[in-house]
Amino acid sequence: MNSTLRTIALCLLVVLAACKRFPNPFEGERVLARAGKDALRLMDLEAVLPTGITGADSVKWVENYVDRWVRDNLKLQEAMLIFGDDAADEELVRAYRNSLITRRLEQHLIEKMAGDSLYSEKDLHDYYNEHRGDFVLDRSIVKGRVVAFPTAYRQKTRLKQLFASWRGDEADEVLAMAQKGAFTLREVNDWTEYSQFLALLPTRRNASYDDLLTRSGVQEMTDGGTTYWFVIAEKRTAGETTPYEMVSEIVRQSVATRRRAEIVKASEDSIYRAALLEKRAVINL
């Protein structure tokens, strides 16, 4: 048994013991969980632990596997209790166990054929570009920046020049000016709903500010003795494609699911063809 699995399992044992998640899960050496008379041992995990998985991901995988194992076995035992042990029910039990074994085989095939990764970054971006119609915004989003300062501030001309250009040195100088003058500077570098961006400004309730999205450069609002300058650096409006970074996790899951299905299908076809060729399978129709 490798040390990673042992460490994960021991940590999990402590967690499960504290939570008392399973009835009497540690009766006997190296037992992770029990479901009736069935026991899940550390050695059982060694054969199914995915390669390359480490750290918190490993612990989470083990927790999920143990939970699923208990649920599956309790469901099987409940079926046996309700339906008895006649031939028809044995067929159901065998089919259920076969499904578990088949699922394990599929996972093995996926790990064997996929190697270190199911997909590349190119695969993700290709999927995103092919399915742009699935990622359509229903509201406007923006990136930008806002600075609020006393209207009587003496260095407004210099501040506006720096705030408009916003390169590395200029941005640092604006930050220094804001710190020295004790006024507010907000950078919105992640895609944010337009309504949330407007909340940084002295806007009026129920008023429309959609026209601001069509303008460029430094824009201005005032509120009493405070001036607000703001720049909408990037924008996407309702009906446009959602930026990749906002849907990257959905894309990742979709590509992984498709890739797993492709690997399983290709493996099934290969096993099928080899069996027919070697006469280990015969079809008489």
Image (cartoon, grey):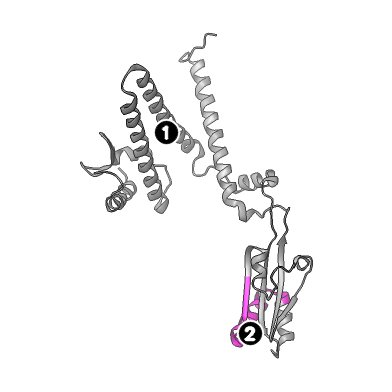
- The quarter of the rendered structure image containing the N terminus is top left
Q: Which mark is residue 96?
A: none
Q: Mark 2 or 1 closer to N-term?
A: 1
- The quarter of the rendered structure image containing the C terminus is top right
What segment is highlighted magenta in the picture? 164-187
Q: Does residue 111 appear to the left or right of 257 in the view shown? A: left
> What residue type is disc 1 on?
Arg
Give the percent coordinates (x, y) of residue 216: 78, 69
| Mark 1, residue position | 104
**Measured along the vertical axis of the image, is residue 183 above or below residue 120?**
below
Kindly state the secondary structure of the residue where label 1 is placed: helix
* Other residues around mark 1 within 10 Å, as few (<14) / some (14–19) / many (≥20): some
> What residue type is disc 2 on?
Met
Give the percent coordinates (x, y) of residue 171: 65, 76
Q: Nearer the viewer, residue 50 or 214?
A: 214
**Measured along the vertical axis of the image, is residue 156 above or below residue 248?**
below
The quadrant where residue 37 appears: top left
Chief secondary structure of the magenta portion:
helix
Q: Alpha carbon of mark 2 to alpha carbon of mark 1: how far?
A: 61 Å
Kindly state the secondary structure of the residue where label 2 is placed: helix
The quadrant where residue 2 appears: top left
**Measured along the vertical axis of the image, is residue 14 above or below residue 92?**
below
